[in-house]
Amino acid sequence: MPDLVQVRDVRRRFGDHEVLRGASLTVAEGEMVALLGRSGSGKSTLLHLMAGLDRDYTGQVCLAGQDLATLDDRALSRLRNETVGIVFQAFHLLDHLSCAENVMLPYAFSAAPRPPAAARRLAMEALSRVGLADRAHSLPGALSGGQRQRVAIARALCLQPRLLLCDEPTGNLDEETGEQILELFSALHREGLSLLLVTHEQRTSRRADRVLWLREGVLHAEAGPA
Ligand SMILES: Nc1ncnc2c1ncn2[C@@H]1O[C@H](COP(=O)(O)OP(=O)(O)OP(=O)(O)O)[C@@H](O)[C@H]1O
Ligand SMILES: [Mg+2]
């Protein structure tokens, strides 16, 4: 399988603090990779780079064979829209919009905007997928943490990405809800979606094809923390 993501020797610093110090990884088409590491090790930073949301790095980040540094903002947005769905560590749902409207947001910004009726139908499909069709008209504030997380996943899925990046998708969930979300990820994985899941939980990493540890700014295969 070709690589959907290639990160080569990436460095990212905030002021004096170099968080990524030559990080390299690949995610193959259809692969599920778990990314582990201590709090503050740079997992979210790395995810944002892979999603093309942060361009302030050295080294190379390629998505679907394209080096992100060679793309202007417009081309980068288009590639991101066509390729990546991201579920942020803090859900980033807009509280004044209903769940369905939150899920429809990416259509408004996509390179090929859908007519509202089509966008609404696709949003409803995505909400059904995460078991929340009946909450389409609720505001996020009226939902539990697990339900909000599922809305965020539906939004990430609505443009039918090839890669889903998730930042601690089950971190705030009870055992059973977390298990349901993991089942959903496994089903998406079986359908051929590539996933990169940041996690602290063994039950998540057990489902992955491969486990990577971020330590001292670089990635290590499998072995636990030093
Ligand atoms: N925008 C920013 N400005 C300054 N420092 C930042 C910024 N983003 C991240 N950092 C710093 O980079 C380091 C890595 O942060 P990051 O959020 O990537 O860690 P993490 O591995 O995701 O941690 P956690 O498991 O707690 O979510 C931290 O020391 C953090 O303070
Ligand atoms: Mg983080």
Image (cartoon, grey):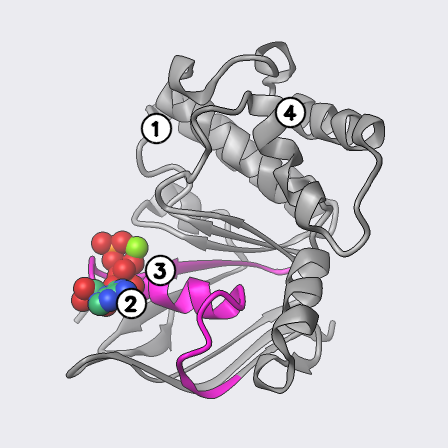
State how far apart marks 3 and 2 are (Cα). Answer: 6 Å
Q: Is residue 86 left or right of residue 126?
A: left
State how far apart marks 3 and 4 are (Cα). Answer: 25 Å
Numbered circle sitting on residue 44: 3
Labels 2 and 1: the sequence-earlier one: 2
Instruction: Check the picture and name the quadrant holding the C terminus.
Output: bottom left
- Let me know if residue 120 appears in the view: yes
Numbered circle sitting on residue 127: 4
Query: Label 1, on which residue?
Result: 173
Instruction: Tell me whether the residue at label 2 lies in contact with that at label 4, contact meaning CB atoms closer than 8 angstroms.
Output: no
Within 8 Å: ligand 1 and the Cβ of disc 2? yes
Q: Position of residue 223 (x, y in %)?
A: 31, 69
Front disc: 3 or 1: 3
Instruction: Examine the image and state in which quarter residue 133 appears.
Output: top right
Labels 3 and 4: the sequence-earlier one: 3
Label 3: which secondary element: helix
